[in-house]
Image (cartoon, helix red, strand yellow):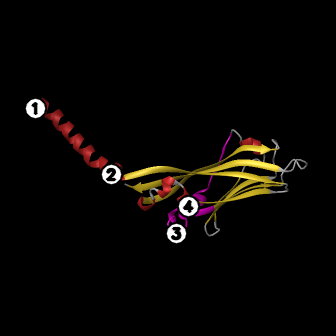
Amino acid sequence: MKKIYKPIFILFTSIMFLGFNSCDVLEQLFLNLKLSEDFHTTGNGPDISETIFDCLSNYDAFDDNFDKIQTLKYVSAAYYTLDATPQNLGGTNISATLYDCLGNIILEQSLPTAQASDYVNNPYEFILTQDEIDTFNQYLANYKTCDCFTAILLVQQVTPADSAPYTLNGVVEVIIEVEAKL
């Protein structure tokens, strides 16, 4: 009879332990919010750029959980080219810059090469320093007063020189982790 009590006691204790400790998991929701900005940059050179204005509140996952959000945290960011005219469009630099609602730089990255075609099927993941991640997270911590941003995609000294007008269609995606209380 003692042999039966021991497994039953262990099973009962395990169920109780899991039951009491697993409730915390059900009180929080973690979402990955993808901020995706399409850029349709066109011009005659020597530089071409496009500026986009957007807000976190334009995204349903953010807006639907606004009152429940506990933290927002930067996860990753990347750029990829959709297409370019001419196909060999390049320049001396391709950069992406993200500003907060007050005009402060949150993120500023130059791509390793200035050939748009290098990123057609090969997205470039931005590598941020810890200071840049901290700056981004400080901006996100103020989401209740400043949830809008400005994004600029810039190609400097566009080449080939005799192929104007130039067009670069690309996407910058930023992933934000949203922790919300249920």
Q: Position of residue 35 (x, y in %)?
A: 58, 52
Amino acid identity at mark 4: Asp
* Image quadrant where one finds the N terminus: top left
Closer to the eye: label 3 or 2: 3
Q: Nearer the viewer, residue 3 or 138?
A: 138
Q: Which residue is mark 2?
A: 24
First in sequence: mark 3 or mark 2?
Answer: 2
* Residue 181: x %, y % from top left: 38, 56
Say which of marks 1 and 3 sits in front: 3
Contact, CB < 8 Å: mark 3 with mark 2?
no
Gap in angstroms between the C-alphas marked 1 and 3: 64 Å
Cα–Cα gap, marks 3 and 4 = 18 Å
Q: Does residue 51 appear left or right of residue 164 in this picture? A: left
Q: Residues within 10 Å of mark 3 (few under 14, many from 20)?
A: few
Asked if the residue at tag 2 contacts the one at tag 1, i.e. Cβ–Cβ closer than 8 Å, the answer is: no
Pair 1/2: label in front? 2
Q: Which residues are magenta?
A: 122-149
* Residue count near mark 1 (Cα–Cα under 10 Å), binned few <14, some 14–19, many ≥20: few
**Where residue 145 is drawn, which disc sits there?**
3
Q: Is residue 144 magenta?
A: yes
Tell me the distance, in whole angstroms, between the alpha carbons under discs 2 and 4.
27 Å
- Whichever of callouts 3 and 4 sits on the residue coming sooner in the sequence is 4
Judging from the image, what secondary structure is the residue with disc 3 in? loop
Mark 4 neighbour class, 10 Å CA radius: few under 14, some 14 to 19, many 20 or more: some
Q: How far is disc 1 from disc 4 in space, using C-alphas? A: 58 Å
> Which image quadrant for residue 9?
top left
Q: Which residue is mark 1?
A: 2
Count the labels in the image: 4
Badge 2: few (under 14), some or many (20 or more) residues near its Cα, within 10 Å? few
